[in-house]
Amino acid sequence: MLRKSFALLVVFCSGFSAGLAQASDESRYLALELNYANPDELRRVDGNGLGASFLYGFELNRNLFLEARLTGLILERGEAGGTDFYQQDLGVDAVYRFGGRAGWQPFVKGGLSVIRNDVDIEDEDDVSLGIGVGGGVISPPLGDLGMRFRADLRYVRDSYLDGMSDTRLGIGVQIPLGRQAGATGDYRGTSATEDSDSDGVADYQDRCPYSLSYVKHDASGCMQPNQTIRMYEVTFDNGTSILTAAARAELVDLVLALRGQPQLQIRIDGHTDSWGSAETNLQLSRERAEAVATHLTLQGVSTQRMSVKGFGETRPVESNATEEGRLRNRRIEIVLLESPRR
């Protein structure tokens, strides 16, 4: 059984190494989790276990990842007040994530482990094969460094002795290892004229590879300050400050662009048409600007970079006499500002 266990793990690790050689710098990460274990009653331990996991993951495609995992757990039997049961777990999991990179990402996972059970009765020590399945969720990036919180619940079937089933809860952080936002990208293998973000600067020279194509850029491909982006497609439910699904989709490219220029400051301006009282429109415009700021924060844009302002109906871009004009006047504007001097 032990030989088969190691043979299966070698097959998984071989695939892991092959994928590592092809993984891009932006798709690798480390994670550290604290674990709470609910062990099988057959283990005869007193209470639950505590431990930690160290993980290294990399992307196979947009939604599929592989994670190498090392877990250490301490289980207690309560005999003479001592710690009598240790467990170490080395394994590989396939992880499938749902949702976009900028938002919350639920995931499912499954894989194989080699588990060492170290108990106080030495002749019961053993190395066995474990099979685990589970799921969890990863938060949006927090701040410009892209760190995420993550949590998962995992069921592990351990072939130790006659077979045992444990449940583990993990909570921790995930840290990207790739190119930091705003740094020059690695475009080896692309042509000298390729321009992925259509900003007029070739990829190999582009310091801001996710910038918006329809704004002014400097020679390095970064968005210039002192310009205003009118976002007519960022809409809200009628009379509210609740972003529509279409609005959240429209903001995806802006999130990527802002995370690619972490020093760029912005102001979010809210505007309305002239229907309703001026006082109500002023309040509603500010609430809508704040709603956009909150959304950007949840997607990893630092609050230190943003300010908000509501103008109500005072700055129309077209006549309020027509429905088309009123629709254009109900808008969000993103004002790109100079970075503060240090």
Image (cartoon, rainbow, N blue to C red):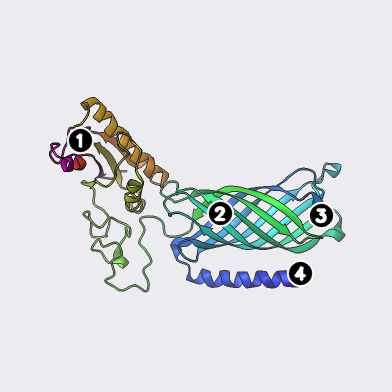
Residue 340 seen in render = no
Q: Main secondary structure of the magenta part?
A: loop
The residue type indicated by label 2 comes to: Ala
Residue 86 visible to the viewer? yes
Disc 2 secondary structure class = strand
Q: Which residue is mark 3?
A: 119
* Separation (CA) of disc 4 from disc 1: 72 Å
Q: Which residue is mark 4?
A: 2
- Which residue occupies 38% across, 66% down? 186
Question: Which residue has dot 1 on it?
Answer: 273
Magenta residues, start to end: 311-326
Kindly state the secondary structure of the residue where label 3 is placed: strand
Check if mark 4's residue and mark 2's residue have beta carbons within 8 Å: no
Which one is in front in this view, the residue at disc 2 or the one at disc 1? 1
Q: Earlier in the sequence, mark 3 or mark 1?
A: 3
Q: Position of residue 124 (x, y in %)?
A: 84, 59
Q: Residues within 10 Å of mark 3 (few under 14, many from 20)?
A: some
The amino acid beneath tag 1 is Asp
Mark 2 = which residue?
31
Mark 4 residue type: Leu
Q: CA distance from mark 3 to mark 2?
A: 28 Å
Q: Of tags 4 and 1, which is closer to the observer?
A: 1
Residue 149 at x, y percent in the picture = 52, 47
Sequence order check, earlier mark of 4 and 3: 4
Where residue 11 sits in the image (x, y, percent)? 63, 73
Q: Is 283 situated above or below 186?
A: above
Sequence order check: which comes first, mark 3 or mark 2?
Answer: 2
Please identify the residue farthest to the front as the structure is shown: 323
> Which of pointers 4 and 2 lies earlier in the amino acid sequence?
4
Which mark is on residue 71?
none
- Secondary structure under tag 4 reads helix
